[in-house]
Image: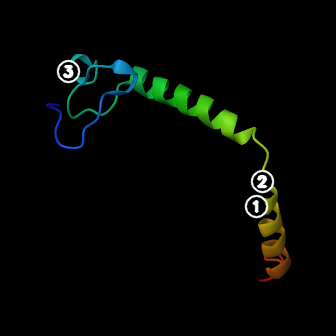
Amino acid sequence: MDDNGPGAGPSPEGVDPKTSDAVPGQGLSDHTQKRIGHHLRAMYDTIVQQPVPDRFRDLIAKLDASTPNSDTQG
């Protein structure tokens, strides 16, 4: 049984929270924040480079056509 509480899954990257360099009550350490940022950037970069599906392009075109230009409204 996991002693991290109900619903707690395994720690990401196999990091043991008991040996973490974060101080309780002080939030995440700079090292941890940088690691999370690096992994998020890498993950989202691959998503951003994927093409937009045709159905989304069609939907955006329909929305643009039915919405009055907000620049001309005062």
Q: Are marks 2 and 1 in contact (CB under 8 Å)?
A: yes
Mark pair 1, 3: CA separation: 45 Å
Q: Position of residue 8 (x, y in %)?
A: 25, 38
Q: Which residue is mark 1?
A: 56
Question: Is 26 above or below relative to 59?
Answer: above
Locate residue 23: give its quadrant: top left
Residue at the (82%, 57%) spot, across then down: 54
Mark 1 / mark 3, whichever is N-terminal: 3
Question: Is 60 above or below relative to 49?
Answer: below
Which of the numbered marks, if any, corresponds to residue 18? 3
Q: Secondary structure at mark 2?
A: loop
Residue type marked 1: Phe
- Mark 3 packing: few (<14 Cα in 10 Å), some, or many (20+)? few
Q: Position of residue 38 (x, y in %)?
A: 55, 26
Residue type marked 2: Pro
Mark 3 / mark 2, whichever is N-terminal: 3
